[in-house]
Amino acid sequence: KAGVTQTPRYLIKTRGQQVTLSCSPISGHRSVSWYQQTPGQGLQFLFEYFSETQRNKGNFPGRFSGRQFSNSRSEMNVSTLELGDSALYLCASSPGLARDEQFFGPGTRLTVL
Amino acid sequence: QKEVEQNSGPLSVPEGAIASLNCTYSDRGSQSFFWYRQYSGKSPELIMSIYSNGDKEDGRFTAQLNKASQYVSLLIRDSQPSDSATYLCAVIRGSARQLTFGSGTQLTVLP
């Protein structure tokens, strides 16, 4: 099976702009979760989508949003970018049950100038 | 108290030795436990999952879970330089589907 894919792999934006990141899960997986990784805060959960519905949300401001399409592909959007949003954004794919293993994509490295 | 705590390291072991990585968690409702390996500049890679008390072995890796003491560990036998990476402990609490991560332990295996 093909793994999780994320596009783009690298992004450079300036403060105030918005950005959209894309994730395609493993074939047959219906759950997509997004995480942010920074040197200071480590890996933090953003939100999880299952069957086009957000099931779970982490403690991030409303500037962070996402959606999932009928083919399970997911996008996350960050509006009004701040310098502190510079991070590695990771998407994780799983079948969708609570105890399921989650498999990460290669990530999108976002730099905000 | 952090929800998931790991020794930040760095931990150095000689090639061929056993590397022991430890993790404690605060929520007794935690049900699922995972170890991920992350090489510098790469994304986390799942290496072990464990759900029940006791040991689970997979090749050179053994995960150990003790729910009463709220700790989970990872043993790497016959450590190789290619095992040099940051090892992340992650927990799923209750019915939530989100992974809560520790800060990671950086392991260096010396040739």
Image (cartoon, coloured by chain):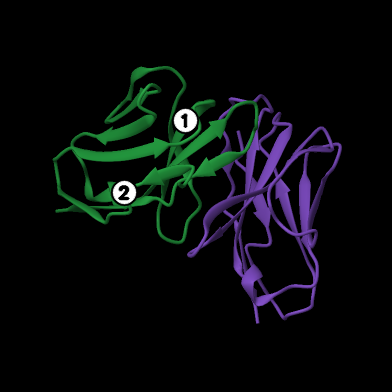
Chain colours: A purple, B green
Nearer to us in this view, A1 or B21:
B21
Q: Is residue B25 above or below residue B83?
A: above
**Dot 1: what SS?**
strand
| Quarter where residue B4 is shown | top left
Q: What type is the residue that disc 2 sits on?
A: Asn
- Residue furthest out toward the front: B1
Residue placed under numbered mark 2 in the picture: B7
**Dot 2: what SS?**
loop
Q: Nearer the viewer, mark 2 or mark 1?
A: 2
Q: What type is the residue that disc 1 sits on?
A: Phe
The residue carrying pointer 1 sits among few (fewer than 14), some (14 to 19) or many (20 or more) residues within 10 Å by Cα, namely many
Left or right: B107 in relation to B99: left
Residue at image coords 38%, 17%: B53
Which chain is indicated by disc 2?
B
Residue A15 x, y percent position in the rendering? 73, 80
Q: Is residue A108 above or below residue B37?
A: below
Residue placed under numbered mark 1 in the picture: B33
